Image: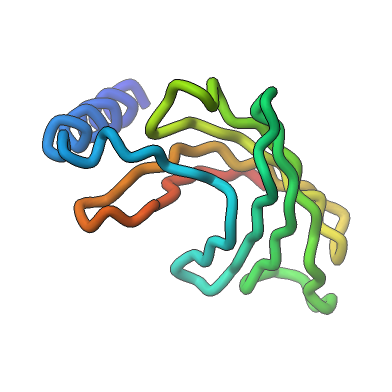
Amino acid sequence: MVHATSSLLLLLLSLALLAPGHSAKKCLLTGKWINDLGSNMTIGAVNNRGEFSGTYHTAVTATSNDIKESPLYGTQNNINKKTQPTFGFTVNWKFSESTTVFTGQCFIDRNGKEVLKTMWLL
């Protein structure tokens, strides 16, 4: 676990050093996001305390229930200073009796596109 954490930290540091031209652009969470599996989420405005809300519609599930759009609530760190902010949010699934927590960071890629890198726990 320590090795994986060290490798991830080294990777993130390397990415930051490789793209100095993009570091001035601020990465914004607000808007619609679609992941590689087709799930989508919409994040509303981030207030001055870093709080936000929105909706999440998953494209994958282990239940036979109809998938429903579900609310999400979260916070972003120090919104006035960070160009690549970290954040966390929870989704309370409306079609099952479970909650998922996500944590991640917003990056600007080499093409100037905003990208979210996240981890989750169901």
* Location of residue 90 by image quarter: top right
**Residue 31 image position (x, y, % from top left):** 58, 57
| Point 70% across, 47% down: residue | 100
**Residue 66 image position (x, y, % from top left):** 83, 78
| Point 54% across, 74% down: residue | 38
* Location of residue 78 by image quarter: top right
- In the picture, measured across the screen, residue 83 lies left or right of residue 45, that is left
Q: Nearer the viewer, residue 70 or 97?
A: 70
Q: Nearer the viewer, residue 114 or 101?
A: 114
How does the figure colour the protein chain or chains? rainbow
Farthest residue, direction left: 18
| Point 44% across, 68% down: residue | 36
Relative height, residue 27 to residue 75 (above, below): below
- In the picture, measured across the screen, residue 91 lies left or right of residue 12, that is right
* Number of numbered markers: 0
| Point 70% across, 67% down: residue | 57
**Residue 4 image position (x, y, % from top left):** 31, 31
